[in-house]
Every structure is written in structure tokens, then in C-alpha cells.
Image: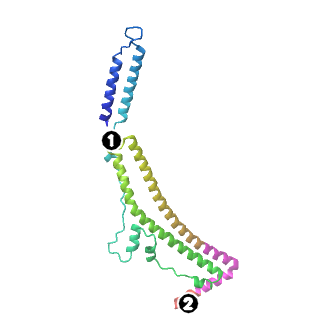
Amino acid sequence: MMRRILRPVAAVVAALLLVVSVPRPARAQAYDFLVYDDANWYEALLQLIQFVEQFRFLLQQAKRLPVDMATRYHGHSVDWTFHDLESGLLYAQRILGALNTGDPTGSAYRQVVEPLDVPTDIVGRMPATLQRRLTDAYAAIEMADSVSELAVDQMGAMRTEGPVDEQVAKDMEKDAVSTNDDYHTQTALLNKINAATVLGLRMQDHVSKALMSTLEQMIVANQRQRDAEAQLMNATIYQWRYGQAYGADLFRNTAANIDGWRIQ
């Protein structure tokens, strides 16, 4: 790169020196004698000095770091890992395969969970308060299943695309520390900056999807915890509303049931 700059610049400097050092003879229309302008010669000399200073600045800016960048700034990333499907597994191959490559239909997840019965034929025969408790608990299980199915599919998709993005990052690292001058022109630098920005946006998108899946699982866990606390609170309110007799009767019946169960 330095040689490419020096060759044309040296030629220009030599030409300028020749111009400023040898005054040109000029002839007036009516007079036959040499015309020499000191001001023009001085201005050309100042321009030459300014050009030399600019050239020195460009040479300074074109210097590389005095280190082995490929070794000094090499980044180490953890490779994506996949579940081993050939390690003597008996029943988890399909769900682990879904975690490796994705499962848009959710069938692999449903294969390893207890099937949920459909209660529509008995809900109508329940008291209204019991219907509400049943349908709320049923909805919580449905939410958990949907969130888990999406999480399995997204993890598999990220494992599939992750190594590709990782290789792009490694290639960009090689280009950044390349000793080839063609990789460090102004246009090349802008291209690498733009590529790094796009890659960063894509990685941020992956992080956002993973965080969304985690947040959804927290929503399900919070809903279940809230329902459990609400049921306890309602039982406490019910007990205080109907007095001590209800509580004593409830305790007595519960104790009797436990004793009967032990006898059986």
C-alpha cells in the first residue's frame, strides 16, 4: 500500500519541484525581455510545502499497528452444542432431536407429556364455582403446553442457524485483521462496518426471541402461583366469613377422612 502511494506522489513532487525551480520565460506583446514574478513563485512553493505536509500525514495514517492483530485480538467463542441422539437413549430421541433442529408442529413435545383429557362432557354438570376453577386450571396447562412447544421449536431453530452466524463472525474477524491492503480501503471498511451492524442486529433478534420464550414461561409460572395463592386466600376468606364452626367442621371432616384412609 505504501508503494502504491509513493510512486505517483514522487512523480508529482518531482514535477512540482521542476516547475517552481525553473522560472518560465514570458514575453510581453510589445517588449522582448524576461518577465519573472516572485509572488507566483512563492505561492507555488507554499503549495508544494503544504502538499508535502499532507503527504506526510497520509503516510502516518496509512501505518499499520505494530502487532500481530490476528493473534493479539483473536476472539474465542463457545461452539454451539447439540444433543447426542446416539448415546443409548430409549424414549427421548424425538424431543432431543426437536431441540436440535426445531419442531414447528409441537408433536415431539406432546409425545413426552401426559395427554390432557377433554372435559367438555362433564363441565356442564359441575357447580358454577367449580366450573371456573376447573377451566382456569385447564387453561394454565394449555398455556404451559403452548409456551413449551414454541420454546422447543425456537431452540432447535437457533441451534440450526447459530453455527452459520458464528462462522460469519469468524470470517469478519479474519477480514478485520487481514494483511491484504484491499481489505482496508475506505469502501472496504464501510462494507465491513455495515456487515457487522447487520450481523449484530440479527444476533440481537435471536436474543430477543430467547428472552421472549423465557418471559412466556415466567408468565405461566406466575399464573400458576397466582392461582394457588388466590385459592388459599379465597379459602381463608370463606372460613372467616362463615365463622369458627365452619373451620371446626372442615377440620373434623378432614381428620375423619384421613383416619378412614389410614384404616383402609
Question: Please, what secondary structure does the residue beneath circle 1 have?
Answer: helix
Relative placement, left or right, of 263 versus 33 is right
Q: Which numbered disc, 2 or 1, marks the residue closer to the eye?
A: 1
**According to the image, label 1 marks what residue?**
181
Q: What residue do we see at 59% from left, 85% from top? A: 122
Report, in whole angstroms, how far the alpha carbon at label 2 lies from the one at label 1. Answer: 88 Å
The percent coordinates of residue 77 (x first, y second) are 36, 55
139, above or below 124, in the image = above
Q: Quadrant of residue 108?
A: bottom left
Q: Which residues are magenta?
A: 230-255
Relative placement, left or right, of 25 versus 249 is left
Decide whether residue 104 is among the magenta residues: no
The percent coordinates of residue 260 (x first, y second) are 55, 90
**According to the image, label 2 marks what residue?**
260
Packing grade of label 1 (10 A; few <14, some 14-19, many >=20) is few
Q: Count numbered badges in the picture.
A: 2
Q: Nearer the viewer, residue 95 or 17?
A: 17
188, above or below 146, in the image = above
Q: Amino acid at mark 1?
A: Asp
Relative placement, left or right, of 106 versus 9 is right
Question: Please, what secondary structure does the residue beneath circle 2 have?
Answer: helix
- Magenta segment main secondary structure: helix
Q: What residue do we see at 49% from left, 61% from top? A: 211
Q: What residue do we see at 40% from left, 61% from top? A: 161
Packing grade of label 2 (10 A; few <14, some 14-19, many >=20) is few
> Can you name the residue that lies furthest to the front here?
29
Q: Quadrant of residue 36?
A: top left
